[in-house]
Every structure is written in C-alpha cells, then in structure tokens.
Image (cartoon, coloured by chain):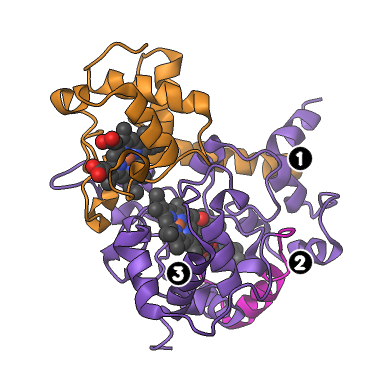
C-alpha cells in the first residue's frame, strides 16, 4: 500500500485538507480557528509553529508564517487587507528569489512577485477572526510598549543611521531596504507590543530569519517601537 | 481514488514552485563546506553584500555606508581573518567599522562563522583558508 507513504509526504497540508486532528500542543481556541481557515491558505502559510525550523524552510515556504497572527495584526487592517491585499514585502517572501544582479546595485524583479488572492468582505471578517486566534506562547508581553513620552525624532534617528533598520525596511514608501517587510504602514498593521518583541529578538519568532538580533537597549526598543507604531497613521 | 489526487496536489504544487525558482549563486561543484557557506551567504549576507558578492546588494539603497566588496582580491587581502570573524560575530562596531554591518551570532554558530571566513577567502581568491 502506498497510501501511508503519501500521507507522510503530504504532512501538515494533508491533515488540513481532511480537517483531521490538530497537533496536540495547540490550545483549543487555535484548533477551532484553524478549522475555519481554508486549506488553500495553509498551503502557503504555516498556521502552527513549525516543529523544526530550518534555513531550508525559509527558501521553500510560499508565504510568511501566520501561526502568531493573533499576536501581530490589528484587526481593522487585517479585514481590509484580505479584501485588498497590497504588497508588504518589496522583495517578496524570500527576496533572493526575486533579486537580479545589476549596476549600481542589485534590484528586485517586481514582475516576478505574485499578487495575493483577495476575498470578499464577509470572508475577510471571518478569516480575520480566525487568524487572530492564532498565538504563540509567551512571544509578546502585553502592555510592554509604553506610549507615554516617546520621542518620535529620536525614534526616527534610531531607525535610520544609528541602528540601521532602514538597511532592510522602508519607513517611507520607496525609501529604505527591501529584504524585510515595509514598515511605512506599520502603525495600522502591527500591534506595538509585537513590534517591540520582534525588534528585541527576531530569532524568537524564527531562529533562521535574516534579521539578526541587534544590540538594543530598553530605551532604544521603546523609541523604535514608538516611531514604527506612528507610521502610516496620519492618513488613516 | 479521489483522495489520493487531493493528497498529491500539494506535492505537485511544491514541485512547480521549485521549478520556477532561479538557481541560487551557491549552485556548482564546490566542496560541501563551501557550498553550505555559499548558501548561508545567499540567505543572510547577499541582501547587502550582493548576489555576486560585490558589495552591491538590494539593500544598499538604504545604506549610508557601503558594504565591503567581498570579491575584491586586493581589498580583502588586507583584512585579517580574526577581524573578519569578529565583524561577523559581533558586528561592524566591534572592529571599529560601521554598525550597519550587523552581528550574526544570534543566527550563525561559531563553526558556521569560521567556515564563512574560509568562504570569504575563497570568494576573494586572496588567502589560504587555515
């Protein structure tokens, strides 16, 4: 019988296709939520924490991880983005696959980046609610970001030359590096506590991601988060 | 057997996905260690140092200090291996260079960093790996 083999090979996707039992470690709320998310989404996105993260997984996955979506996204943004998905990662989910050598520098072949499937308003609301149930354990500390007394000018300087976030992230459309997600609408998209937690230790989210843990003090983290959380808010 | 088809679908999609990818710069008949380091370089370093290792990565548009050209035989020959390792492990600031060169010890193991130094000497054709 070849069936068992095929089962093993298709792994998690097969489990979802058949709405079979969820991984035992998932909390009950997440389990129910995953059942509400179509298998097509799961074919590109990890909805549960990968058991063995590897560099290879980052080269083969077709979309960013959503297993901590509930720690990360603002609901309003999510509902609207799912209906009208604009690009977030200027270099695609893995920039190298879209990079071409050139002068004066390598560029991204934007034509090779696929458009994201869109859904209707009712589906978007349902999906957003399901996605917001997906949370990692102890990834973020609620209330850790303190909005009082944040100095945006200092935050902007840190983001730029001082800490070099702009090497990989855009804080204004078209301005900054392209290997990481743009952050110019991060104020609408991301929860500030997530921004802080990710900036402090990206390896906690994925050990192999190509943003390394940078040496940042607590005041650095607060002002960077304050700056990022302010981006894109004015034109709401 | 309809559900055998359903099971195969993800595999077929994965295969299709693999075929449209272009070849990473690490492809080629090199020693396994060099190939492994080249792959890590593609993943982590090429974003700034360039897919051709020439210092012209996609991210240089956001950089106020230009990354080292790792293909420059003369320039790289003057860079001691120790300093290279320190820069990769602890970041540019640890060797009195720009902090825009980040520290990689949260991602790469000490052994991978040693191998990366050998790899850089292979790329610049400017020294014997020790």
In the image, the chain rendered in orange is: B
**Which x, y percent locates residue A172?**
31, 72
Q: Is residue B101 left or right of residue B17?
A: left
Distance (Cα) linking label 1 and label 3: 55 Å
User: In which quadrant of the rendered image does the N terminus of chain A lie?
Assistant: top right
Q: Is residue A110 left or right of residue B77?
A: right
Q: Nearer the viewer, residue A87 or B113?
A: B113
Name the residue: 64% across, 74% down. Answer: A128
Label 1: chain letter: B
Circle number at residue B1 = 1
One can see residue B27 in this view = no
One can see residue A232 in this view = yes
Circle number at residue A33 = 2
Q: Colour of chain A?
A: purple
**Which x, y percent locates residue A114?**
41, 57
Is A65 situated above or below A106? below
Examine the structure image and report whether residue A186 is included in the region drawn in magenta: no
Residue B124 sits in which quadrant? Answer: top left
Examine the structure image and report whether residue A124 is included in the region drawn in magenta: yes
Distance (Cα) linking label 2 and label 1: 29 Å
Neighbour tally class for label 2: few under 14, some 14-19, many 20 plus, Cα within 10 Å: some
Label 3: chain letter: A
SS for dot 2:
helix
Q: Read off the residue under disc 3.
A: A224
User: In which quadrant of the rendered image does the C terminus of chain A lie?
Assistant: bottom left
């Amino acid at each position: 019988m070849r069936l068992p083999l095929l089962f093993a090979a298709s792994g998690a996707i097969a489990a979802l296709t058949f709405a079979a039992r969820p991984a035992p470690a998932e909390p009950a709320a997440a389990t129910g939520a995953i059942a509400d998310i179509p298998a097509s989404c799961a074919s590109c996105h990890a909805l549960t924490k990968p058991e063995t993260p590897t560099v290879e997984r980052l080269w083969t996955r077709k979309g960013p991880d959503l297993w901590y979506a509930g720690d990360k996204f603002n609901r309003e943004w999510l509902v609207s983005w799912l209906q009208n998905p604009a690009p977030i990662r200027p270099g695609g989910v893995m920039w190298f696959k879209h990079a071409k050598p050139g002068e004066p520098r390598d560029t991204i072949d934007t034509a090779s980046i696929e458009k994201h499937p869109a859904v209707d308003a009712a589906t978007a609301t349902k999906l957003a609610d399901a996605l917001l149930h997906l949370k990692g354990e102890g990834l973020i500390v609620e209330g850790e970001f303190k909005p009082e007394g944040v100095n945006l000018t200092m935050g902007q300087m840190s983001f730029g030359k001082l800490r070099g976030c702009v090497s990989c992230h855009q804080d204004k459309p078209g301005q900054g590096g392209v290997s990481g997600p743009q952050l110019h609408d991060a104020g609408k998209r991301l929860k500030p506590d997530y921004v802080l937690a990710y900036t402090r230790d990206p390896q906690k989210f994925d050990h192999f991601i190509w943003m390394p843990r940078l040496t940042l003090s607590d005041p650095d983290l607060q002002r960077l988060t304050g700056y990022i959380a302010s981006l894109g808010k004015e034109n709401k | 057997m309809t559900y055998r088809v359903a099971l195969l679908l993800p595999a077929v999609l994965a295969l299709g996905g693999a075929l449209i990818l272009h070849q990473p710069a690490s492809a080629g008949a090199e020693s396994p260690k060099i190939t492994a380091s080249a792959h890590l370089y593609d993943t982590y370093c090429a974003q700034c140092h360039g897919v051709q290792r020439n210092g012209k990565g996609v991210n240089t548009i956001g950089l106020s200090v230009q990354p080292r050209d790792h293909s420059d035989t003369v320039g790289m020959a003057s860079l001691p291996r120790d300093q290279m390792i320190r820069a990769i492990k602890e970041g540019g600031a640890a060797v009195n260079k720009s902090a825009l060169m980040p520290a990689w010890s949260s991602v790469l193991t000490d052994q991978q960093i040693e191998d990366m130094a050998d790899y850089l000497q292979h790329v610049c054709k400017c020294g014997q790996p020790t």
